Image (spheres, rainbow, N blue to C red):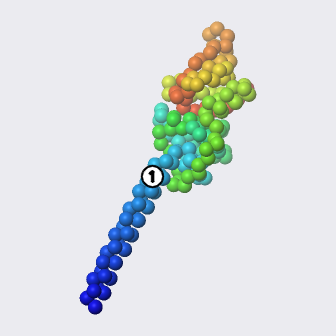
């Protein structure tokens, strides 16, 4: 009978250690899985309104409409005057309203692909960086910069080109070509 208790005790200790080891492995696997999640995957799974705080402290609010590999389009809530805003993920400092769910999609276009489509379609854009804001059409999209041709320079009356670093972009919004 003494042997039975000893064996039972050893088996219980072994089972407890095995469960603790499994719990530790599960926790480690969970941490490793979470470490692989990127913000775009969290934004892609978000259904609630979000507040996106940009690098200059300004805030873009609304619902996530589209998410690419390195960009997000935030659509304002109904009744707001502003239009959809394209925000590079690199311009985001903080996001409020994002849940813990994720949805990965490896086939999403990169920001430069979206910029080239906007260039091709000759869309009039308002482009904001931390230092400036400009309105014009994209003339060129390089690997790390883009050329924005403004409609008219207010002093010379001629179009003016500004070169903007892509990593300086905060937000892009389609502009109304005839605001009045």
Quarter of the rendering occupied by the C terminus: top right
Q: Residue at x 48, y 34 (%)?
A: 55
> Residue 161, relative to residue 9: is it above or below?
above
Q: Residue at x 67, y 46 (%)?
A: 78
List x then y, in percent, for residue 86.
Answer: 61, 36
List x then y, in percent, for residue 165.
Answer: 54, 23
Quarter of the rendering occupied by the N terminus: bottom left
Q: 140 and 134: which one is in front?
A: 140
Q: Can you see residue 140?
A: yes
Quadrant in which residue 79 is drawn: top right
Quadrant in which residue 142 is drawn: top right
> Would you name the residue on which mark 1 appears?
32
List x then y, in percent, for residue 88.
Answer: 56, 35
Residue at far front of view: 3
Q: 96 and 166: which one is in front?
A: 166
Q: Is residue 31 left or right of residue 79?
A: left
Q: Residue at x 67, y 13 (%)?
A: 159
Element assignment for label 1: helix
Q: Is residue 121 left or right of residue 162?
A: right
């Amino acid at each position: 009978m003494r042997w039975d208790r000893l064996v039972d005790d050893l088996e219980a200790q072994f089972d407890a250690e095995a469960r603790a080891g499994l719990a530790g492995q599960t926790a480690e696997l969970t941490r490793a899985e979470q470490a692989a999640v990127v913000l775009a995957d969290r934004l892609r799974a978000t259904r609630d309104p979000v507040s996106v705080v940009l690098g200059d402290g300004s805030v873009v609010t609304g619902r996530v409409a589209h998410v690419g590999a390195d960009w997000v389009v935030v659509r304002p809530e109904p009744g707001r005057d502003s239009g959809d805003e394209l925000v590079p993920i690199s311009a985001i400092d903080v996001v409020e309203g994002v849940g813990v769910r994720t949805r990965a999609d490896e086939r999403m276009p990169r920001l430069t692909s979206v910029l080239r489509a906007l260039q091709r379609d000759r869309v009039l854009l308002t482009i904001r960086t931390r230092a400036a804001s400009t309105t014009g059409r994209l003339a060129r999209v390089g690997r790390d910069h883009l050329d924005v041709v403004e409609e008219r320079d207010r002093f010379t009356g001629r179009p003016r080109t500004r070169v903007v670093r892509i990593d300086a972009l905060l937000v892009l919004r389609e502009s109304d070509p005839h605001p009045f």
